[in-house]
Structures are given as structure tokens and as C-alpha cells.
Image (cartoon, grey):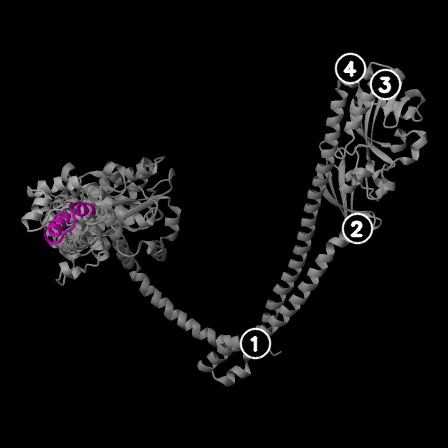
Amino acid sequence: MRSTSFLTKLTVFGFLLSTLPVLFIGLFSYATSSREIQSHVNKGKIQLLIQINANVEQILVTVNHTLNQVLNSTVLKRAMGNPLSVNDFTLYDNLRNELRHMQSFDTRLEDVVLINRDYNWMVKNSGLYRFDEYAHYDEIDELVDSSGDSAWMLNPSDWFYSEENAGSAPCRYSISLAKKLPVNGLDKSGLALANIPACALQDFLSGNAERDDRLMVVGEDGRLLLHPDPELIGQPLEAAGLAETDKFSGDSGQFRADIDQQPYSVTYYRSPYNNWTYVSFTSIGSLTKESDKIGMYTLLVCLFMLLFMLSLAWIGSRRMYSPVQQLMLQLDAGAATGRKNRSDEFQVIGERVRHLFQSKSRLEQEVHRHIRQVSAFYLMKAYQGGGKPSELEDQLERFGYGERIRDWELKAVLTLQIDSLESTGYEKRDAELLLFAIQNMIEEIIPAERRLAPVTVEHTVVLTVGGRAGDRTYLAESAEASRSPESAASSASAESAESVEAAASSASPASAGAAEFSKTAHSASFKEEIIALTEELQKKIADYLRLTVSIGISLPFRRLEDLSNAYREGLEALRQRLKLGGGIIVQYEHLNAGKHVLSLHYPHQLENELIEAVKLADKDRAKELLHQFLVPVFASETSPRECQIPLTRLLNNLLVVMQESGIAVSVIHPERSTLYEDLLELNTSAEIEEWFWSCVVHPMLRIFRDRQEAQYANISEKIIDLVHRYYDTDLTLEECAARLHYNPNYLSSVFRKETGRSFSEYLTAYRFQTAKKWLAETDIPIKDIAAKLRYNNSQNFIRSFRKQEGITPGQFRESRGGRAL
């Protein structure tokens, strides 16, 4: 039997793959839409019933409230104690007024009936009656003897109409609020009935008997209180076609029922006020009309999608098979072989792929040989802050650390250094081999899932350990003796036989001591486990390598981005050997107040004041502020590398000020090297302060001073020009500032700096020179000169002139050959 070609299989599969999802989506969307429509309709019905209930209960509560007011009134209490004969007309009229006030549009009351069985009278709209002579005495008298002091009930309307107008009842039934009288007495001998015609509440119900959507209200006794068909009011609920009355068990709900052999969705809500049940009948057919439309639209869309997907599957199958066909032609098998046995298409391809995979496997083996070295190199780079922190997790994932670092909540970096090789039997050239042996011991003592691979960075073994916060598991579980005692030694170089033997001997007892360590670390917290781990490492190294080592422990951290900071913390902890000596274990937690990395207080305020002084070209102030800024920077307990940060920051901010002011860096630093390079080459505080002053701050001061001088001269010239033009007006410094758009205080400072005089002094001097010119060259009267020069009066001008020249204006004019006026 000829096998089916791959193209045929691909086409059939494409047809199935395109058909099944379309059919599933179509059916699912139709079912979901139908269900959602019905759900929304049911929710809407519940809300409608709750609204109708609220509207009806508002009227019932109002009636109850007004009836209580009447029953507690003085008029009613007096009437209940009297026989109400024709002689009690005033009392009767007052009682009728009380009852008439209850009958308003809001209450929808048709009649209020009062009955006093003790005095045998009955009062209602039509008048006063002898109770025992009333037509429906027996029926109403039973209400007086009924249980309960107050209740809503459904009564025939003709009970409350006299014989002469019995046919005038607006509805067959009335909804009555019955209250026994007296209200506060123990012997109930009277009755008050507030009657609301059932049809008066009918407008609250939307729908009618002919429509598919019906609303009705059922009383606590199971009779219909309100119904679109008035003929059904007063009849049991079964008369409306619903026989399953036992399903009204909860406070609200929906269920399906058959009414007149038609399926209906029944929604009900039970009022907590009077236990009336509000019921809605909705035809299932009306609910599914929209669903049928959606189903039709869904069918059309699905047919279109199906045709489109089948066409796409056919075209796609042909195109997908094309590469296979081309690949077959390019392989060793000939085209003829492919035609004879189409089922072997992939057999040929598979053989070639297996050959490629074999080549790939050999390549992977070569790569795995170097993966350890690549991983160690990357960890060394990460500890030293190389690479992007955002890529750190992805890179560690590539090296197989992904699962363990995701499982760790807390991490810490350990830094281990050999204190000294003197008097140990080792030579200086053995240091690298000893560090390698220590790495091997760490790998055997600490399980791989609790650590990253230890690496050596600048004669320091660096290790990252991790675990869960508060986890009581062992951080150093017993490493099974998966490595031979000679594993460490076999890894060491053969350069020193004595060193190799020491390294080999270090591996064997390590695995034996791991179980002992796990016992000491039992039930310890994360920090305690790390301390126990470092103590055990230090002890094992001392026992088997005869070396004294010191270990620094960083603060626990959570984010991998903090790995380089934690490495720096570990190194900073190791620097305490300068004070404490060798063979120590130092936690960075005990340094720097337990805060991460080193924190340097940057003097922001001094920097701002320094920049302001530079902009104002205040040389002395700028030099003083530069010194004040550098003193706390150099006095902070930080490493030289950390100290470079605030210095570089200050330089950067000064360069930003230059750039914002339009000053090119080449103006103050024309050399090829950058200012940052020059700064980082300086070694002492004196050199750095002198460099900042001579190479950055002072050149900037010169530039800003030159700019200010040019600006000041320009401003002063403008002020002088205003004085020369408007000296004969009430010119003030504030007016000049408004014209030139400057602050008056700033203009005053600039003008005094340029001219050596204040604005008022210069204005007064110019006016005085003008006055002397007018006195010598013109015949303008002295009083007019005084007025023109804005003196209050001529006497003030004369006194001021005499003070300046020693003579009066008239004497000055005569001395110049003029005539005093």
C-alpha cells in the first residue's frame, strides 16, 4: 500500500487545525453570549423587583406612619371613649378631619375605617354607622378577633362600602393595614383599617397579562396582591399558572418553570418588611431572541473564517513543503529516490541531522570543558562591578545558577585572604596554589545549591552564599564524598610537590568534617549560619593547610544588583586587620552603622554657595567656600576611591554651570587630556584643592567677572542716559529698574560699583550742574530753575546751592555776568 506523502499529511493536518478552533470558538461564543444575556436579564430583573419593592414599601411605610399619628392623637382617644351619637357632632367632625388628612396622593388611601365594638359605632368616608347594623358586620368583626395587633391584609373592597354606593368600589380588593385599638391597651375592642385599592399600586408594575414579561406581588398567605390581570388579584399563586410554589424558599433567586406549557425564567424577591414576594415571569423565548441573532452572526463569521482558514491551510501547506522539497534536492539522496519512496523524505533528512547533532555534541563537550573558567571569569568581573547590573541575573542563568538564586531570599558575600606565609613552610610562589586548595575545600564543605562557585580576585577568595530568610536549614550540609581525597591535589600544579601534598591533604578531611559542621549550624538563623560557616572554614584551613586566614562578611542583601557592593563590603571588613590583626572574622554589619556600602555626606549647601559665589565673581568668598567644601570630603572615613566620588561630582556640577552659561571647556582647559583624568591623577588633598582653584574655579571667576564688568558698564550707561533724559521729572531708581527690567537693589549695587556714587547722589549732582549751566547761560528765573529741577520750592534750591557753592544762585549768575532774576 502506497504511503501518504508528507504534503498530503500536512494539508490534512492544516485543515483540521484550522477547522476545530473555528468550530470551538463559534460554539463557545454562542453559548457564552446566551448565558451572559440571560445572566444580565436576571440581574436586571432582581434590581427591578428591588426597586418596585422600595416604591411600594415607601407608600406602605407612609400609611403606617400617618395611621400611627392618628391613632395616638387626642381626638381619637376621646372618640374611643364616647358612643359618638348625633350630639357628638363636633367630636365626630374633628375625627373625620383627622382621617381625611391621611387620604392624600402620597398615601393613595381610599378609605380609613374606625370601629369601636364597645360603643357599637363605625366611622368611614360615607359616615357614622352602628357597627352591629353594618352589612358586613360579621366579616369585619372577625378581623377584630384575629391574632396580632397590626398586619397588612387583602380584603374585598365591597366590605367597606355601604349598600347605596357598593358598586362604586374602584377595585375588587383593597390592601388594608389593620391595627387593633386602643393601641396601648390590653383589651383590644376596636379596629382601624387603612384601605389602599389594589389597583392604585398597579402602576408600579410594568407589564401586562398579554406580554411575555409579567410582574406580580404575592402576599404572605400565598394570594396575589398585585397582578397585571385584575381578575387574578386575591387568588392563589397557582392561578397565575405557576404550580412550583415550593421554590420560593430563599430571600431572592431565579429558577425555570413551565407556565401554560411555555418555558419561563422566574425571578423573585422577598421583602423583609412584610414578607411579600415580588415575582417576575420572563419568557425564555424572549430571552433567546438576541441569542439567536448572535448565533446567526456567529455562524456567518465562522463560515467565513473557516473558508479563509482552509484556503490559508492549503497555501501554507504548499509553502511549508517547499523547503522540504528543496532540502531533499540538496542532500545526497537523488530526486529519483524521493519520487520512488516519498515516505523516506525525512529519513534522509534525519540521517543528515543526526550527523550534525553528533558534530554539535562534540562541540558542546569542548565548550563544557571551558564553561567553568568562563563562569569564574564572569563572577570575577561581576564582583568588581564590570558589566551591566541588569544583565547579571540572565548571565548567571546561562551558567546554571538560575534556580538557586531564585530560591534564595538572602545572599551574602564572603571574602577570604591568607594573612601571611611567613613561618608556614610555604613560599610566596605557593600562594596561588594555596588559594586554589582553599577553593576546593569550600566546594566540598558547602553544598552547590547554597553557593556560587568560589573565585579568586586579587589574592582574595570570594564566595557568595544564599538561603531563605529565617530558614532553619543547614547552610553547610554534608557534602557526600563524591570527590576522592586526592581531588584537590590532582587539580593543583606540580610546580611544588610539597604544596601539592598539602592541597591534597586538605580535601580529604574537609568532607569528613562537613557533617560535624552541619551539627553546629543546626537551627541557626541566616547570619548565625554564615558566622558558623566562616568559623568552620577558618578552623579547617588552619588544621589541614596550617594557614591563618581572615574572612570578611558583607551585609545580607536581596538584589543581585548589589553583588559588587557586597564584595566591596567584604573587602572593607577585611581592612580591619590593620587594627585587629590576622585570623579574624569581621562582619560589615559592625562597620558603618550597619548600613550598606559606604555612605558619604555630600555638602550640598556649600556646593550651592560656591557656585553662587563663582557666578557673582566673588573671588575671596569662592576660595573660602571651596576650602570649606573639601574639608569634610577629605575628613570622611572613606577609601581614596570612595573619596573620588564627591570630587568628581563637584567637578561635574561646575562643568554643568559652565555649559549652561555658554562657556566651552576648552576656554579653561585647552590640553588634550580631560579634567576628569587630571583630577583622578592627583594624590594629596593639597594638590586637589590647588588644582580645583587654579584649573577650574579661578578661570571661571575670571570669565564671569569679565562678563559682569561688561554688563555693569552697559547697565550704568543706560541709567546715566535715563538721568540725562529725564532729570527734569520725578525720576527714581525704581522707575529706572522698571524701564530696564532689573531689580532696584541690583541696579543700585551695579551703579555704585561702576560710578562710585549712589543713584540719588548722581542725579542730584547732574541737576546741580544743569542748574549752574542755566544760571550762567540763560535768563531763566531762579524759581523756574528750581521747579524744573524738581525742588519743592525755590528756597530749598537756594539753600542747597549755597551749601554746594558757598554763594546763592543769584550771586553765582552775577559772577558769570548774568542778571539775577
Identify the residue position indicated by label 2 in the image. 212
Mark 2: few, some, or many residues within 10 Å (few <14, many ≥20)? some
State the CA–CA distance, disc 1 to disc 2.
Answer: 52 Å
Q: In this figure, which residue is indicated by the disc labeled 4?
A: 185
Q: Which of these two is toward me, 565 or 714?
A: 714
Give the amino acid type for the residue marked by disc 3 in the picture.
Phe
Give the alpha-carbon distance from disc 4 to disc 1, as whole Å. 95 Å
Quadrant that contains the N terminus: bottom right
Is residue 242 located in the magenta-colored stretch of the structure?
no
Which label sits on residue 315?
Answer: 1
Left or right of residue 426: residue 275: right
- Write the start and end of the magenta stretch as one range: 766-787
Mark earlier in primary sequence (2, 4): 4
Local secondary structure at mark 1: helix
Which element carries disc 3, helix, strand or loop?
Answer: helix
Q: Nearer the viewer, mark 3 or mark 4?
A: 3
Residue 193 spot, x, y in % from top left: 82, 26
Q: Is residue 444 above or below residue 179?
A: below
Q: Secondary structure at mark 4?
A: loop
Depth check, front residue: 370 or 477: 370
Question: Is residue 776 magenta-colored?
Answer: yes
